[in-house]
Amino acid sequence: MARTGSCNCGAVRYRITADVRHTGACHCGMCRKWSGGVYLGVEVAPADMNIEGLDRLTTYTSSPWAERAFCGTCGCNIFYRVTAPGPHQGTYHVGLGTMDDTSGITLTEEIFIDRKPQGYAFAGDTRKMTEAEVMAMFAPN
């Protein structure tokens, strides 16, 4: 099932052609500041992401391996994208909250679990990765 979504003002719209069924939560400090809380992202391969309004997107290089994109008009955060060379390069992590329909999508993973504030917790069983485990994915070979 294809998924669609947009920013608040509609200047940036996207269509995900893959069948998306899972979301992950990131508890790192940068994602919390960027999203105003925990960031819930849907992983999308570059070939499965079609974006309209690219000229309205503003990107911010947030680390040596990634960039974050938001609407230059309304400021809505759209995605986090891996820029580092390797198997994850180009992968989008689209904000779950920007999707038009999230039915059938379940939380399956939490990263930077050792950075999660104590004030909240998710129900259910998820795969959990620490900061060290996540950083190891982006370490040079």
Image (cartoon, grey):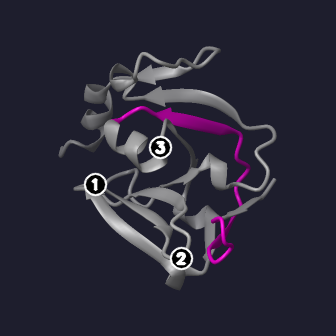
Residue picked out by circle 2: 73
Residue linked to disc 1 = 65
Mark 3 vs mark 1: which is more N-terminal? 3
Residue with the most extreme left position: 140
Identify the mark nearer the N-term, 2 or 3.
Answer: 3
Residue 33 in the image: state x and y as whole percent.
Answer: 38, 44
Kindly identify the residue that appears in the image at 65 percent across and 55 percent down: 98
Cα–Cα gap, marks 2 and 1: 26 Å
- Mark 1, other Cα within 10 Å: few <14 / some 14–19 / many ≥20: some
Identify residue type, mark 2. Thr
The picture places residue 129, in percent across and down from the top left corner, at: 39, 24
Q: CA distance from mark 3 to mark 1?
A: 22 Å
71 lies above or below 89: below
Give the magenta part as a residue range: 7-28
Residue 26 in percent (x, y) is at 45, 35
User: Could you tell me which secondary element the residue under label 2 belongs to?
Assistant: loop
User: Of label 2 and label 1, which has the lower sequence position?
Assistant: 1
Residue drawn where x is 29% and y is 28% of the image: 131
Disc on res. 36: 3
- Direction from residue 77 to residue 50 in the image, left or right: right
Give 134 or 6, whichever is nearer the viewer.
6
- Of 40 and 87, the residue lying toward us: 40
